Image (cartoon, rainbow, N blue to C red):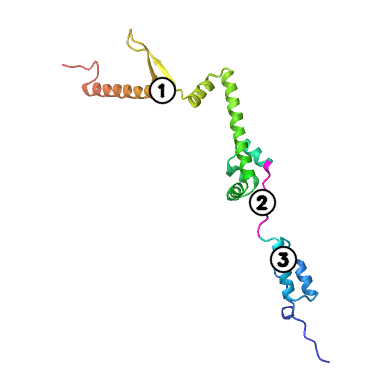
Amino acid sequence: MASRKPRNIKSSKAKRVRKGEPLWVDAMQKAGASQGVIQSAMNRARRDGIGAQRGRPAVEIDEDSLAALGRQGCTNEGIADILGIARSTLQEKLAATETLRECLVHARAMRHRDLRVAQTSLALGGSARMLEFLGIQELGQRKKLQVSGEPGQPPVALSITDVVAISAARRREREQLEDEEADAGGPGADTE
């Protein structure tokens, strides 16, 4: 009797399934389909979107989640972190999908409106600091300090920056006088 050599899988006529190919390719090979028929079926499957998915799964961003994060004041980086995706992926999705972009813009606009309503209600409720803030931000008002001038003259209105500059100049004058007095022996020094 002649001894049989064990069959080597690599030397078999049928090609093995490549990594990532669907199992039906292996079934077609076992059924004896030619390589041309298998390749044609694989090309059709890829064209029609059937078969093994290549790469990472597509990211789907829910509009409701995006709107909620936008209304909470999250930046794009914060939204990407919370959704578990890269910031560049979020930017690509927003650029490619008009509805997502509009959803986020609308959510942020609603947040700004809500903040303005809250600030206005605080100001109208009597908050002097909020009234001052809104006056500066929205009406271009400046914080001014009334300083009485010379007797018989009307008071002078100065901005806070003017007051700071005047204070710094007075402090320099005072320091200069103190230095001169120290050089001269100071007030009350004996001069004989």
- Upstream in the sequence, badge 3 or badge 1? 3
- Please tell me whether residue 182 belongs to the stretch shown in magenta: no
Q: Name the residue under label 1.
A: 160
Kindly indicate whether the residue at mark 2 contacts the one at mark 3 (C-beta within 8 angstroms). no
Quadrant where the C terminus sits is top left
Q: Is residue 60 above or below residue 115?
A: below
Query: SS at mark 3?
Result: helix
The crowding category of the residue bearing disc 2, from other C-alpha atoms within 10 Å (few below 14, some 14 to 19, many at least 20), is few
Which portion, as a residue range, is magenta? 55-63
C-alpha separation, residue under disc 3 versus residue under disc 2: 25 Å
Any mark on residue 17, and which? none
Residue kind at label 3, given as amino acid type:
Arg
Q: Quadrant of residue 111?
A: top right
Image position of 185 (left or right of 35):
left
- Please tell me whether residue 57 belongs to the stretch shown in magenta: yes
Any mark on residue 44, and which? 3
Residue kind at label 1, given as amino acid type:
Ile
C-alpha separation, residue under disc 3 versus residue under disc 1: 75 Å
Quadrant where the N terminus sits is bottom right
Nearer-the-camera pick, 33 or 75: 33
Query: SS at mark 1?
Result: helix
Q: Where is residue 7 in the image (x, y as percent from the top left)?
A: 77, 82
Residue kind at label 2, given as amino acid type:
Val
Q: Position of residue 103 (x, y in %)?
A: 64, 40
Image position of 135 (left or right of 50):
left
Nearer-the-camera pick, 76 or 106: 106
Q: What secondary structure characterizes most of the magenta part?
A: loop
Q: Mark 2 points at which residue?
A: 59
Q: Position of residue 165 (x, y in %)?
A: 35, 24
